[in-house]
Image (tube, rainbow, N blue to C red):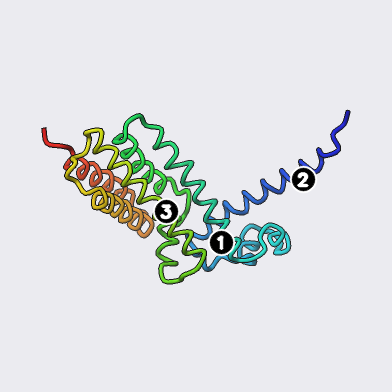
């Protein structure tokens, strides 16, 4: 018995692979050219594809931008968040999350460093759906760091007198500076300095014996 839907399924699968390839290229391009500079015409030229071919995947520039953000978020989740949260203690998960961010930046997954840091700097004064999607990611990151700090306090690994919001702010600021310096100067020492700074701050957060 033959399956008459097989060619249709194969065509759909090829289309999904093509869309993933396009969006991965778009996410990389956005960290150097900016999300606002991302257009169907410009992306088509960058990847050697016709504009009509891209329009088949994305009906508008905003749709392309939003899909690009979702792709970058999925990559970040696969490289940073999901592996970090596999740890068996909150303090281990927190340390791993911060370390994997540094590795993510240094691996040059995106040529412009952290996708979301680049997008936030570009879009902070441009309200709309695209900026809102970036803000949602940033809010989620901060919420996760605060949550891990709070859990580590409950487990006795971080001093209960530490303000979780303040500590999360300081740790994220260290990562942001490392990302900015690495992107501007291709300075790998900045990533090592971030590791030292994070470790030092977390040592000071350990409860007194």
Residue holding disc 1 = 65
CA gap, disc 3 to disc 1? 16 Å
Q: Secondary structure at mark 2?
A: helix
Quadrant where the N terminus sits is top right
x and y, in percent, of residue 120 in the image: 41, 62
Residue at screen point 16% across, 44% down = 161
Residue visible at 71% across and 62% down?
Answer: 50
Q: Pick whichever of labels 2 and 1 is earlier in the sequence.
A: 2
- Quadrant in the picture for the C terminus: top left
Question: Observer-nearest residue: 29 or 8?
Answer: 8
Residue position marked by numbered label 2 in the rendering: 11
Residue found farthest to the right = 1
Callout 3: SS: loop
Which callout, 2 or 3, points at the residue further toward the start of the chain?
2
Which residue position holds label 3?
A: 114
Q: Earlier in the sequence, mark 3 or mark 1?
A: 1
Packing grade of label 2 (10 A; few <14, some 14-19, many >=20) is few
Determine whether label 3 and label 1 are within 8 Å by CB: no
Residue extending farthest to the left is 209
Q: Is residue 180 left or right of residue 197?
A: right
Give x and y (percent) for residue 123.
44, 67
Which residue is rendered at x = 51% and y = 60% of the image?
Answer: 30
């Amino acid at each position: 018995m033959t399956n008459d839907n097989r060619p249709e399924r194969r065509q759909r699968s090829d289309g999904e692979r093509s869309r993933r390839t396009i969006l991965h290229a778009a996410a990389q391009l956005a960290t150097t050219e900016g999300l606002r500079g991302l257009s169907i015409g410009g992306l088509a030229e960058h990847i050697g594809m016709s504009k009509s071919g891209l329009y088949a995947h994305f009906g508008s520039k905003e749709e392309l931008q939003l899909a690009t953000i979702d792709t970058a978020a999925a990559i970040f989740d696969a490289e940073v968040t999901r592996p970090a949260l596999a740890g068996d203690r909150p303090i281990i998960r927190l340390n791993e999350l911060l370390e994997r961010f540094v590795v993510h930046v240094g691996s040059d997954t995106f040529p412009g460093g952290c996708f979301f840091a680049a997008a936030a700097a570009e879009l902070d004064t441009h309200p709309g759906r695209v900026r809102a999607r970036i803000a949602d990611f940033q809010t989620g990151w901060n919420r996760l760091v605060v949550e891990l700090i709070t859990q580590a306090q409950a487990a006795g690994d971080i001093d209960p007198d530490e303000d979780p919001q303040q500590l999360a702010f300081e740790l994220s600021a260290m990562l942001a500076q490392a990302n900015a310096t690495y992107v501007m100067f291709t300075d790998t020492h900045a990533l090592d300095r971030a590791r030292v700074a994070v470790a030092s701050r977390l040592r000071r957060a350990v409860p007194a014996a």
